[in-house]
Amino acid sequence: MPIATPEVYNEMLDRAKAGRFAYPAINVTSTQTLHAALRGFAEAESDGIIQISTGGAEFLGGQYDKDMVTGAVALAEFAHIVAKKYPVNVALHTDHCPKDKLDGYVRPLVEISKERVAAGQNPLFQSHMWDGSAENLKDNLEIGQELLAATAAAKIILEVEITPTGGEEDGVTHEINDELYTTVDDAIRTAEALGLGEKGRYLLAASFGNVHGVYKPGNVVLRPELLRDLQDGVAAKFGTQNPFDFVFHGGSGSTDEEIATALENGVVKMNLDTDTQYAFTRPVADHMFRNYDGVLKIDGEVGNKKVYDPRSWGKAAEKSMAARVQQACGALRSTGTRLK
């Protein structure tokens, strides 16, 4: 199937919310990790979301120039071609973009999609994220209003992060403390500024103790039940039941119970990066350790081309990452839910 159209993407999100499941959103940094994500979704018979962070886009742009837009566009165009071979619908998304990178990343990409839509085509990306968590809420929402108008005009969904997520993601760092919890007042102010769909659809990354990166279970206090308070608080003021489509950030290391509670309270998208990075790299490390005398030209020998050929370890890396994506689909209840 091709990359999801705006209509299909909206249907995907609607079905997830109604069915209380969520799509894994898998960060990719290469054509190979893209294939691993697509393979995992296909094997789980789940639609999904593939995303590129600013750091991922810079890496994709090549180390000679490190242009984020070039990297993102190149992989997106590649995805539009190869995704047709997989029996699932996939949306393309750009992950965390802070204020100082908007002009070099999200805004140019929105303009590219705007031109495509004006020419009768579908947007290149189906959604973009504005990470204003380092700004005060007033400034965050003002920029969000501007971006929402631009994305809606290009048939794109906007994701906004209104309060901090702990840890570090592509250079944006927040302390792990009691500020990592969005309040009902924060949610009401968001609804007042961005509307509840009439100004354009958006996904909301609210904070309920989330932390990016690697952590052991028990080191972070997640409160996914807080999402119900946000839904009910805004519903009481505006009369719209379950108004938000929530995103779960910093999901690596979460328990099944925490994930289940988040799904019941409106999470439709959950980001995975740390766990899939490890799943991709682990078999590569194993291959190198087991075949060190073949991948290296030791003591004047010539090595073994069959084991230092990138395809020999790349296939194992793709398989392992695909299995982790498939596992995520099971945890998020999206297995077997693909649109026919």
Image: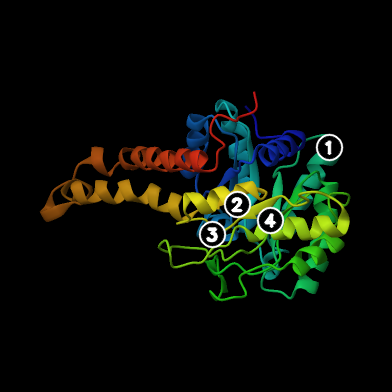
N-term mark: 3 or 1: 1
- Give the distance between the C-alpha atoms of the residues marked 4 and 3, in whole angstroms: 19 Å
**Residue under the image location 48 percent in, 67 percent down:** 220
N-term mark: 2 or 4: 4
Q: Secondary structure at mark 2?
A: helix
- Give the distance between the C-alpha atoms of the residues marked 2 and 1, in whole angstroms: 39 Å
Q: Mark 2 or 1, which is nearer the eye?
A: 2
Specify the quadrant that holds the N terminus: top right
Q: Mark 4 or 3, which is nearer the eye?
A: 4
Mark 3 closeness class: few <14, some 14–19, many ≥20 residues within 10 Å: many
- Give the distance between the C-alpha atoms of the residues marked 3 and 1, in whole angstroms: 38 Å
Label disc, if present, on residue 119 of the rendered structure:
1
- Circles 4 and 3, Cβ within 8 Å, touching? The answer is no
**Residue under the image location 11 percent in, 55 percent down:** 299
Vertical placement of residue 145 versus 166, above or below: above
Which residue does the numbered mark 3 point to in the structure image? 250
Label disc, if present, on residue 262 of the rendered structure:
2
- Give the distance between the C-alpha atoms of the residues marked 2 and 4, in whole angstroms: 9 Å
N-term mark: 4 or 1: 1
